[in-house]
Image (cartoon, rainbow, N blue to C red):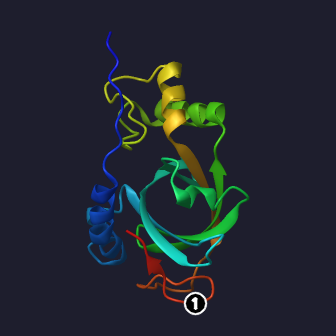
Amino acid sequence: MARTRWHPPPESLFNAANRVVRPLLRSRLHPLVSRRLMLLTYDGAKTGRTYAIPLASYRGAPDEVWAFGARTGWMSNFRNGRTVRLLLRRRDLRAEATAVEDREQVARLLEELVQRKGPGAVRDPFVGFPRDRHPTHEEALAAADRVRIARFHLSTKPWIQGRSSRSRSALGRPATTRS
């Protein structure tokens, strides 16, 4: 069987989509996109700037949410763990974020997610899993070469008391939106 080389979607596509999705996730129209997407807000480790990024979300456990990143800069902020804000179905939640970067561990977690949710559950374009069957271990390892997993352990404390329609950093500054 001939293998085709995987090509990531263009970054400009994600930038354009983020400009539309970010306000939708904060609005009353959030049900259109919030079943699969969440808004991650965090302060950059090096810059201190606050970023708000829409991400596909996957429930790893009742108190844990996962997101995939394709070796992008935002994932490196969570190597040593850090507190972040998640807007999940229009609920502001505090979470502890940790990056999973070990290839074997990423592959194992991807396989575990497909076992629990079924083929086709992982629709992230960077993962590239088949939708009609369970991936082989080799396919999971190939996906682990392309992606990392951010694990968000949800806190019982809300990020901000009540609902907030604007992203704010831990310091109370408005968030810098990043395309």
Q: What element carries label 1?
A: loop
On the rendered structure, is 38 left or right of 111? Answer: left
Q: Residue at x 55, y 71 (%)?
A: 93
- Quadrant position of residue 154: bottom right
Determine whether 171 is above or below 155 in the image: below
Among all residues in the image, which is located at the extreme bottom?
Answer: 172
Query: In the image, what residue type sits under mark 1?
Result: Gly
Residue labelled with disc 1:
172
Q: Which residue is drawn at 46% across and 72% down?
A: 52
- Numbered label tally: 1
Determine whether 21 is above or below 69 in the image: below
Q: Residue at x 36, y 77 (%)?
A: 26
Q: Where does the N terminus fall, quadrant-wise?
A: top left
Determine whether 39 is above or below 64 in the image: below
Q: Residue at x 40, y 84 (%)?
A: 165
Q: Where does the C terminus fall, quadrant-wise?
A: bottom left
In the image, 84 versus 6, the foreground residue is: 6
Q: Does residue 160 appear anywhere in the picture?
A: yes
In the image, 137 versus 113, the foreground residue is: 137
On the rendered structure, is 102 left or right of 58? Answer: right
Residue 2 point in image, percent of width and height: 32, 13
In the image, 147 versus 21, the foreground residue is: 147
Determine whether 90 is above or below 134 in the image: below
Q: Does residue 63 appear anywhere in the picture?
A: no
Residue 54 point in image, percent of width and height: 41, 64
Among all residues in the image, which is located at the extreme top?
Answer: 1
Q: Residues within 10 Å of mark 1 (few under 14, many from 20)?
A: few
Residue 79 point in image, percent of width and height: 69, 55
Residue 104 point in image, percent of width and height: 64, 30
